[in-house]
Image: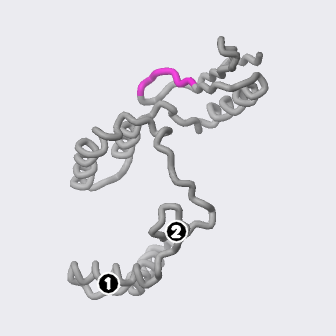
Amino acid sequence: MANTVRGHIEQLPSGSFRVHVYAGTDPVTSRPRRLKETCPDEPAAAAALGRLLNEADGGRFPNRAATLGQALDKYLEVTDLELSTREAHQGYTRRTIGPVLGDVKVRKLGGVAVPEDAYAFSPDPAGRTPWNPDTMTHRYRRYARRIGITSSLKELRHYSATQLLRRALI
């Protein structure tokens, strides 16, 4: 079985193999980070050892024990929000999301696989169908009317481009 300074493979009583890799110290908790993976056979464990060592070297490893509550707390910590928006997000998280999903591990939530050719603006989370172009135009017109301005989506696009050019950002 393969052993390195920062990782090793052990055989479990069931006959499976568990890979352990030391991945440094967690900057938040100051506790050691360890990556673990269980494999059905020794060749798969050796491959997993190499992969986990690469992940640890690149600092790209996931926190497999992270909960949704921890992820949302981290989001609020690092995101630049106005005070009222931050308070609204914190309240919503505390009252609505936290009690139901706060302790659920992020890896258990699953997700939607988004294909490479997905539409960026789509009513479907997977991006399979595009919005009708008029939908956004009508929506913007309603919002503009509601706040009392006379503007079109085209004018907004041109204004944004002009401001970017003025600041030499494009």
Rounded to the nearest whole Å, what is the CA distance between mark 1 and mark 2?
21 Å
Residue that appears at 64% across and 32% down: 57
| Coloration mode | one colour
Q: Position of residue 165 (x, y in %)?
A: 48, 78
State whether residue 108 is above or below residue 52.
below
Q: Is residue 129 above or below residue 91?
A: below
Nearest to the observer: residue 141 or residue 130? 130
Determine whether the residue tagged by mark 1 lies in a helix, strand or loop. helix
The residue that appears at 50% across and 39% down in the rendered structure is 107
Q: Quarter-wise, where is residue 40 in the image?
A: top right
The quadrant the N terminus occupies is: top right
> In the shown orientation, is residue 77 left or right of residue 2?
left
Numbered circle sitting on residue 77: none
- Name of the residue lying farthest toward the front: 14
Query: Could you tell me the amino acid type at mark 2?
Result: Ala
**Magenta part of the chain:** 29-34
Identify the mark nearer the N-term, 1 or 2.
Answer: 2
Q: Secondary structure at mark 2?
A: loop
Q: Amino acid at mark 1?
A: Arg
Relative height, residue 25 to residue 13 (above, below): below
Label 2 crowd bin: few (<14), some (14–19), many (20+), radius 10 Å: few
Q: Is residue 144 above or below residue 101?
A: below
Residue at image mark 2: 120
Which residue is at a point 62% across and 67% down the rendered structure image? 117
Asked whether residue 159 appears in the rendered view, the answer is no
Residue 156 visible, this orientation:
yes
Q: Which residue is mark 1?
A: 141
Residue 24: x %, y % from top left: 56, 25
- Indicate the quadrant where residue 53 lies: top right
Q: Is residue 99 left or right of residue 135?
A: left
Observer-nearest of 35 and 23? 35
Please count the marks in the image. Answer: 2
